[in-house]
Every structure is written in C-alpha cells, then in structure tokens.
Image (cartoon, rainbow, N blue to C red):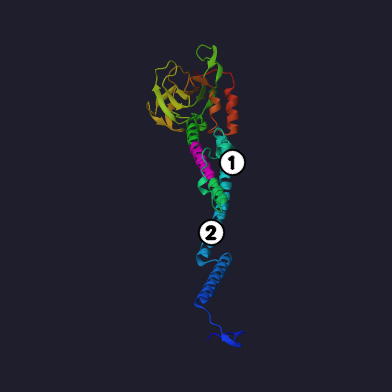
Amino acid sequence: MAKVKYYYDADTLSYRKIERKKRTTFKYATVFLLAAGLFGFLCFAVASNYIESPKERQLTRELNNLELQYELLNKRMDDAIAALENVEERDNAIYRLYFEANPIPEEQRRAGFGGVNRYKKYQGFDNSQLIAETNKRLDILEKAIVVQSKSLDEIAKLAEDKEKFLEAIPAIQPVSNKDLTRMASGYGYRTDPFTKVRKFHFGMDFTAPRGTPVYATGDGIVRRADNSSTGYGKHIRVDHGYGYITLYAHLYKYNVRVNQRVKRGDLIGFVGSTGRSEAPHLHYEVFKDGERINPINFYYGNLSPEEFDVLLRKASLENQSLD
C-alpha cells in the first residue's frame, strides 16, 4: 500500500493530504519505463560483446575447425610437394639424362597462372589470405603433377623405344664359341684366297663345320634369304631397324623365310661353303645406314672381356680371308 503524503498549509494552519494527479503519475511511469528500457538495451549491448549465444559458439567452433583443416591441408601439401620434388629431381637427373631427353626447367614445373585474378572470390572474409594462398598452392601443385605425369609418359615411351633399340641392335656373335674352329679373318685389308691380291674385307669370317647353327644377332625382320648376290652364295639379310642390317653368307641352308620376324639368338641358318668360299665358314657383315662397318664392336652381348680381347687380337691380324 502506497504511503500517504501530507503538506502543511500556512493559510489554514493545517496539514493537507497530497493528491497526485493522474497525468503526473502517467508521466513518472513513462519516464521510469523508458529509463528501464534504455538501461536494459545498454546491458544487452554490452553483454553481447562478451557473452556468445549458442549459435555464435557453434559458428566459432566451425570457424576454428575450418582454420585447423586449412593448416592441416597446407602441411599435407608440404609433404606432397616434397615427394613430388624428389620425383622431379630423379626425373631430371636420372631418367631424362639416361634417355638423352632435355630436363624440364623449374619455372615450367612451378609456373603460376597469369591473367585474371583467379582468387578474387575468396576476398572479403576474415581468413581470405589463408584461403586464397591455400588454393593457389593447390593449383600450382596440381599443375606440377600434370607436368610430371606427362614427363613420365614421355620417359615411358623413351624407355620402350630404348628397349626396342637395345633388343634390335646386333649384340652377339652369330656363331657360338663352342662351335668355332677358329676366327679366320677380321674386318680390314686381307689377302684374297683366290687372286692372292690384298683387298678390303668388309666382314668377319668364322670357321666352323658344315651345318653349325647360325644365330640372329638382334631382333629384326628377314629381308632376304637367297643366293642371288654375287659371291655370298646362300645368305640371309636381317633388317633390325634404326639403320642396322646384318648379313650372314655362304650358308649350307636356311631356317627362316623372307619377312619372318626373328629375335636375337634365334636359329636362322647353318654354316656352309656356298658361293665364293674356300672352306666352310660364316661370313658376317654389319651395315649402318647403308655403310658396312666393323662387326667387332657388336659382340658385347655374349662375350666376356677376356673372350673379346682374344677375338680382337685375332681379328686384327692381316691374314688371308676365306672368301
């Protein structure tokens, strides 16, 4: 119950009850409510800066988690870049060097993206720099991986070609050492067995009994197996590709046919003495780009260093050839 208030009236020398007008009461109430509302708003505004709502707390956790994920992503990219750099180093220093291919320059491997700003859409946020830099690193990493992938495709193709080349090039002796009587004559000036005139001998003569196996010295295709070349008698010519052709002359008989594909070590014929020949032997020649070259350089595939030295000494002797 509200207290009743009085005031002293000097005219009547008595106390009179204070009567509050309704307008005054309404004014006081309005002022009180406005003050209370203003105070409450100020308290809310101040508290909102220090106290998070449940939704704000959730958004803050999500933002912190997002920052953490970006940091982890950057660390994983560091590991991926380190692994890629290791592959790139081996690619340039080993693979491309071995296959005689030009190394890929660093600026090509790590090239950025010119022109329009690709990362403009990430601007205007609290973590714009982190997001933009992460996406930029990811783009460069993806491009470097594409460059390396194409390089490895090229290396694989070069390796395949190199393997085919190594399989095709003449690399073994056409007659096994165990079947040889002797290495009769080498490449160079020799005495002709029929005219006794010194002339250039373009192949190597391997003496062996009639019927001794003759082997293809490299992978290739049989282009000729006939006796229509003067002096060679029954002979075989194998095209190895890459400009190499080998010739096997004075054969007793063939074991292949024209256009047949052969592998190194395949039995293609047998030693004989057909054509211009003094005794059973194999006359062996190697052609490179149409020119006859010394076969002595093409026996590394089945001779030991000691056996090669012996063969080299015998081939260098200027003696009489057998054809």
Of marks 2 and 1, the one in the foreground: 2
Question: Furthest residue to the bottom?
Answer: 14
Q: Looking at the image, which residue is at 50% across and 41% down?
A: 146
Question: Where in the figure is residue 116, as x and y percent of width and height?
Answer: 51, 39
Check if residue 153 falls in the magenta segment: yes
Q: Which residue is mark 2?
A: 63
Span of residues in magenta? 138-156
Question: From what the image shows, is residue 76 above or below residue 10?
Answer: above
Q: Main secondary structure of the magenta part?
A: helix
Amino acid type, residue under disc 1 in the picture: Glu
- Foreground of the two, 88 or 25: 25
The first of marks 2 and 1 along the sequence is: 2
> Horizontal and vertical percent for residue 117?
52, 42
- Element under label 1? helix
Can you say whether 230 is above or below 266 in the image?
above
Q: Is 64 contained in the magenta span?
A: no
Looking at the image, is 307 positioned above or below residue 77?
Answer: above
Q: Position of residue 142 (x, y in %)?
A: 51, 44
Task: For mark 2, give the secondary structure.
Answer: helix
Any mark on residue 89, and which? Answer: 1
Amino acid type indicated by mark 2: Leu
State which quadrant residue 105 falls in. top right
**How far apart in space, not on screen, are marks 2 and 1 (Cα)?**
39 Å
